[in-house]
């Protein structure tokens, strides 16, 4: 005699639940990012979850795909922080004050020579201010032969000054911006120790890292990076391996040398990429895209391969595709 009321209550409960849940499901579907929608529609919800966890790394800290006006400047780094992505950048050592190559302070810069990024006008201003000859300071001059006094006059084609390694690390650490710093010329031990001290104090030691490729002109040597890894004064520093076609290393070799992460080798099939990343993860390391990727097709492939970060010249576009 009590079955009918129980049935009525059950039906009523189901109706209430459906009324409440349906809008929530619709809202959840509406808030899914393009990346999540793509992999969900592919029937791969486990990959859709990676859209929220895969890191965005801005190549040379660029905030657009154009170069020279915004790469490797504080303005670019601040933009990365504003939109919530990480950065990739490069460091060289300047000449000492008396002109000895690469014996001065470390700065943020990509190229070997200064002419692509630095304006002719600011190079001329540096010559006038320091008394350098045009033969010694011109667009073809190597950054490692520039003194700090000359460097302070340099401006990019967008009018931006160039930062030192110390300025870059301090801002990134203070503002919690992850960054992978490629070593073009190894900083001094004093600079590296100061960097690690800053990173420890700001709890960014695992987030701001150094990386490099083997030297192709010295039998694929990784000695410079291993000196950093093995230095007891730099305990806890994270060092990454940059794969090149000339000097590839297996995940096991990379792990055994003490690296914490690696890029993927170029030229791999999707199946080979997935296998490489699995080996890296099994060894407790992380893996990133082999090159800077600016198209959705490349982003999809790297999410499928389960990389931990994707480097790009279009950080905002990638962030929006991943996160919505």
Image (cartoon, rainbow, N blue to C red):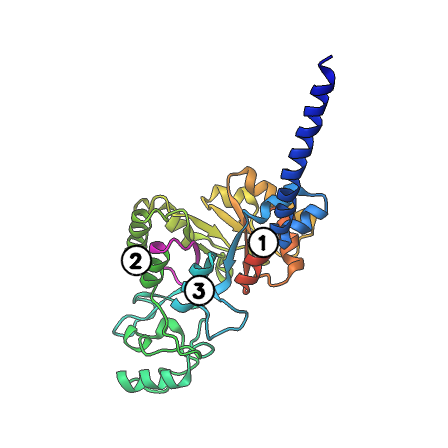
Q: Position of residue 63 (x, y in %)?
A: 49, 67
Please, what secondary structure does the residue beneath circle 3 have?
helix
Badge number at residue 79: 3
Q: Position of residue 190 (x, y in %)?
A: 27, 56
Q: Position of residue 27 (x, y in %)?
A: 62, 47
Q: Position of residue 114 (x, y in %)?
A: 42, 76
Chain part drawn in magenta: 173-189
Q: Is residue 72 above or below residue 202?
A: below
Question: Which one is earlier in the sequence, the residue at label 1 or at label 2?
Answer: 2
Quadrant showing the C terminus: bottom right
Residue nearest the observer in this picture, 258 or 194:
194
Residue nearest the observer in this picture, 45 or 134:
45
Q: Nearer the viewer, mark 3 or mark 2?
A: 3
Residue nearest the observer in this picture, 10 or 32:
10
Q: Are marks 1 and 2 in contact (CB under 8 Å)?
A: no
Q: Quadrant of residue 166?
A: bottom left
Q: Nearer the viewer, mark 1 or mark 2?
A: 1
Residue nearest the observer in this picture, 229 or 202:
202
Q: Circle 2 sits on which residue?
A: 191
User: Label 1 neighbourhood size at 10 Å, few (<14), some (14-19), many (20+)?
Assistant: many
Q: Is residue 5 visible?
A: yes
């Amino acid at each position: 005699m009590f079955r009918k009321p129980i049935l009525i209550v059950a039906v009523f409960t189901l109706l209430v639940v459906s009324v409440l849940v349906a809008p929530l499901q619709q809202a959840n579907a509406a808030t899914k990012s393009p990346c999540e929608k793509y992999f969900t529609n592919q029937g791969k919800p486990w990959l859709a979850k990676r859209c929220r966890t895969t890191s965005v790394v801005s190549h040379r800290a660029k905030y657009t795909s154009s170069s020279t006006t915004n790469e490797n400047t504080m303005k670019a780094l601040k933009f990365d922080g504003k939109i919530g992505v990480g950065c990739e950048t490069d460091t060289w050592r300047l000449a000492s004050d008396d002109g000895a190559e690469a014996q001065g302070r470390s700065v943020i810069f990509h190229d070997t020579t200064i002419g692509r990024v630095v304006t002719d006008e600011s190079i001329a201003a540096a010559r006038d201010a320091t008394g350098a000859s045009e033969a010694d300071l011109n667009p073809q001059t190597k950054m490692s032969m520039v003194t700090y006094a000359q460097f302070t006059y340099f401006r990019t084609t967008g009018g931006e000054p160039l930062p030192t390694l110390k300025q870059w690390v301090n801002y990134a650490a203070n503002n919690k911006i992850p960054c992978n710093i490629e070593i073009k010329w190894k900083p001094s031990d004093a600079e590296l120790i100061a960097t690690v001290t800053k990173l420890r104090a700001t709890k960014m030691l695992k987030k701001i890292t150094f990386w490099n490729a083997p030297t192709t002109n010295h039998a694929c040597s990784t000695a410079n990076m291993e000196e950093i890894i093995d230095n007891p004064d730099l305990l806890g520093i994270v060092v990454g391996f940059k794969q090149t076609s000339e000097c590839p290393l297996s995940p096991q070799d990379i792990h055994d040398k003490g690296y914490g992460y690696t890029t993927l080798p170029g030229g791999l099939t999707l199946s080979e990429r997935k296998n490489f990343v699995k080996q890296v993860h099994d060894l407790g390391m992380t893996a990133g895209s082999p090159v800077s990727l600016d198209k959705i097709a490349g982003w999809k492939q790297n999410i499928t391969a389960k990389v931990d970060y994707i480097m790009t010249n279009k950080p905002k576009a990638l962030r929006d595709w991943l996160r919505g």
